[in-house]
Image (spheres, helix red, strand yellow):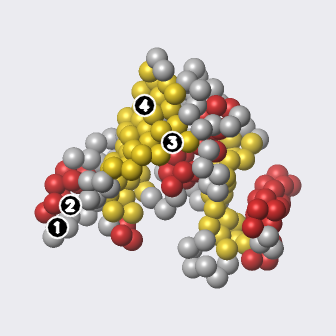
Amino acid sequence: MGITAIEKEIEQYILNNLKERFNLPAEKISISEPHPLNFPADARVFRAEKRGSYGNIYYNYILVNGKFYCSVDENNFSQLLAAEKFTSRPHWNAHQFATLFLHLVVRELRLVESSSDIAKSSDEAFNARVAKITSPSLEIIDNGIEARFWSYQARYKRLDYWQIHIDSDYQMTYERLLNQNKVYFFSILALT
């Protein structure tokens, strides 16, 4: 099965974007289209990886309604939500919202939906945190969006709890509670 004209256009857009941003020539980039679980049906994800980087240098491109959003730009998640008018027309569930966030904002983390998604460990403190895992939640509130979910990075055995608030102007603030119970706060403005 050959590549369609649309697929070729998508590939060319990504290659041109990476050349413009990082001066990476097309022959040094490998593009794939993973199909993650819980990804919205109206969105597609592409992974552009630098050849020879052993998976360490890559960028996610999300295509929704003919517009690309890239994991290089921290405010692209807020821009995506603003373009979709998500606070007034929510059409993704909590799992899909969290999956989009993880692909665009932090990368390399897997959404965890229950304690059965993580293997037991000899570390009792870690197992106690695993026992607290709940399904992702998403709530549209008067002044924006509240989302909560867990993620896991197997490479470092890191389990994180996320609390995200996006206000009605699509300014995003999020907290990341790490294994060590440290909280990191981030604030990102949507530039529309």
Amino acid carrying label 1: it is Asp
| Residue 58 image point, x, y percent | 62, 67
The Cα atoms of the two marked residues, 4 and 2, are separated by: 26 Å
Residue lying at 63% horizontally and 26% vertically, measured from the top left = 85
| Residue 100 image point, x, y percent | 54, 46
Disc 4 target residue: 146
Q: Residue furthest right?
A: 5
The reply to whether discs 4 and 1 touch (Cβ–Cβ < 8 Å) is no
Q: Count residues near mark 3 (Cα–Cα under 10 Å), then give few for <14, some for 14-19, many for 20+.
A: some
Q: Count residues near mark 4 (Cα–Cα under 10 Å), then give few for <14, some for 14-19, many for 20+.
A: some
The Cα atoms of the two marked residues, 3 and 1, are separated by: 33 Å
Q: Nearer the viewer, residue 186 or 141?
A: 186
Amino acid carrying label 2: it is Phe
Instruction: Kindly report which numbered mark, 3 or 2, lies closer to the viewer in this rendering.
Output: 3
The Cα atoms of the two marked residues, 4 and 1, are separated by: 31 Å
| Residue 152 image point, x, y percent | 37, 58
Q: Is residue 55 left or right of residue 11?
A: left
Disc 1 target residue: 123
Mark with earlier residue (3, 1) = 1
Please identify the quadrant where the C terminus is shown.
top right
Amino acid carrying label 4: it is Glu
Mark with earlier residue (4, 3) = 4
Mark with earlier residue (4, 2) = 2
Disc 3 target residue: 187
The reply to whether discs 2 and 1 touch (Cβ–Cβ < 8 Å) is yes
The Cα atoms of the two marked residues, 3 and 2, are separated by: 28 Å
Disc 2 target residue: 126
Q: Identify the element where label 4 is drawn.
A: strand
